Image (spheres, helix red, strand yellow):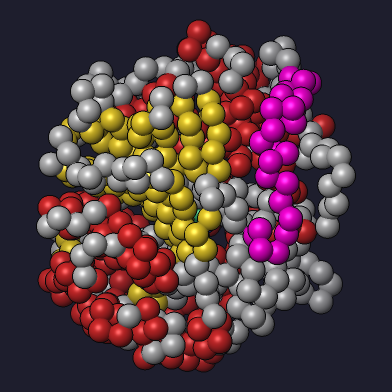
Amino acid sequence: MKKIIYFVAIILLVSCKEEQPLATLKSKDNLGFVADSAMVVSAKEEASSIGLFILQQGGNAFDAMVATEMALAVSYPFAGNLGGGGFMVYRKADGEIGSLDYRERAPYLATKTMYQDKDGNVQPEKSMFGALAVGVPGTVAGIFATHEKFGSLPMEEILKPVIALAQKGFVVTEKQNNTLARYREQFLQENKDTILFAKSYNSGDTIKNPQLANTLERIVQNGKDEFYGGETGKKLVAYLQERGGIMSMEDLKEYQTHWRDPIEVKYNDLKIISMPPPSSGGIVLGQILKMLESYPLDEFGHNSLKSIQVLTEAERRAYADRSFYLGDPEFFDIPVETLLSDEYVSGRMDNFSFEQATPSSSISYGEIPGYESDETTHYSIVDQFGNAIAVTTTLNGAYGSKMFIEELGFFLNNEMDDFSSKPGVPNMFGLIGAEANAIAPGKKMLSSMTPTIVEKNGEFYMSLGSPGGSTIITSVLQTILNVEEFGMSMQEAVDAPRFHHQWLPDEILFEPRAFEAQILDSLTQKGYNINEGESRIIGKVDAIKVLPDGRLEGGADKRGDDSAKGY
Ligand code: DON
């Protein structure tokens, strides 16, 4: 069984990867794109341009969030979505911070063992493909919650350029063309029919999505209820029920977003503000940074043997905690304060030595006294008023469940795979979970998405985040360290080669051909398992940083079509 899961996981991980020739990545000495007042960095030029346009119309970062999120749904259907969910972390110009959880949740008819057969074996394809894989989408509720609380322009004005983009079409890039070609067969298989994105395209072609334009027009007219009860909602539910799904109108009508207090962690002179549960991002990132703080990483050097070792060991320990303690806080009591306390975190590295790897088999979640057990995309925006946001949004796998509602013009997520289908059995990212992340009706599945804002000396300093499943957290981590410890510009920090460890499987994943052979040999000698396979992505970070003179520098990851726009 384990073998089958591993095999499916590899296929899915390949499927989550965009085309990206990974020649040796060498950091550049120059800055990325620089702007004086405002910036949007996202996975697609059209989306960055529309976000920027809204800022230039006098809109704020929250208006631009709505526009960018929807423009990604049009021009980057790989992960941009109406049929998925996400998280936003914000810091307003006056220093107020917060976060919005618009994560999908399990339909009311979901059960703990719904992906197991009668003998208790997990059937991984059921949580990854088809109608049962789909969680109740949160994205439309997310843009309305953001707009209601902080928006300044009318929704109609914000969505106008997005609707025009869906009508006029977006130009297919070479990378997009490659991913579309790779999934064509799966689109046909899952939809039992051809769909807009299953046609044969070439790079440079234009894809128009008039059905999505119509859906967005109805959303402008009828508001959030159009999706959570109106014509769009009814068509969505009918589509899923015809295909054996369990989502009902009640699921849509009762879907809820949550404004949550972000996770705040100090690291040197930085304050890291990141996503709390149901994302594991903020807690795991915070734990790793706290474990690292006492080591002189700047002296060890970027991607040096010692730096790789100490990061790996901290990651191993934090991901072990993730597997046991983290899940939806509405359903499971999470010991957040203890997990991030100095006392608990410092003790976790006690058994680490530079001489020898700590095997993951000897590491479990830490003991907490008195505790009772029981394809994604990121964008960052800074506006001309000084508000900053970091947003990560997802369908989970590339094009989600691959199910596309032709009439409505969008893909549906396969986020149910982020639950733990059975304790100890890995999901498509190889992540293991326990009771905390077991399936329950109306529960939100645990995420790794890590939209993050960094303050330096009390001022806004960086906004960043990444796709990449389990590798999101370590990609965000390394990008922050590249700036803070290794003095890189934002663009250099984003482009620098990355590696990743997640406790289980017990291996360090390296970007291929980007690390010195001698360092990899030394790691092997010390007992580390090395994986330099081609199949995995290690994040695709989009970020913004404030330069010493107050201007903004963008970091648009060169691994994708990512684009920074500003003025
Ligand atoms: O929420 C999560 O952690 C995952 N659903 C994210 C998926 C992802 O990043 C896919 N991208 N490659």
| Near-viewer residue (426 or 320) | 320
At x 63%, y 34%, the residue is 287
Whether residue 358 sits left or right of residue 40 in the image: it is right
Q: What segment carries the magenta color? A: 328-352
Q: Quadrant of residue 439?
A: bottom right
The answer, for residue 414, to whether it is visible in the render is no
**Left or right, residue 440 beside residue 277:** right
In the rendered image of this protein, does residue 503 appear above or below residue 458? Answer: below
Who's the residue at 68% across and 44% down the image?
336
Image coordinates of residue 249 in percent, x first then y, are 52, 88
Quadrant of residue 496 within the rendered picture: top left
Above or below — where is 14 with respect to 181? above
Left or right, 504 with reference to 468: right
Quadrant in the picture for the C terminus: top left
Q: Judge whether residue 306 is colored magenta.
A: no
Give the answer, above or below, for where 208 lies relative to 465: below
Can residue 257 be spotted in the picture?
Answer: yes
Q: Position of residue 503 (x, y in %)?
A: 69, 38
Up the image or down, 287 lies above or below 279; here it is above
Q: Position of residue 270 (x, y in %)?
A: 46, 26
- Is 346 covered by the magenta stretch? yes
Q: Residue furthest top?
A: 299
Report the front residue among 147 and 462.
Answer: 147
- Residue at the (41%, 45%) spot, across then down: 96
Quarter of the image containing the N terminus?
bottom right
Q: Nearer the viewer, residue 145 or 346?
A: 145
In-image side of 535 versus 407 (left or right): right
Q: Residue at x 75, y 72 (%)?
A: 113
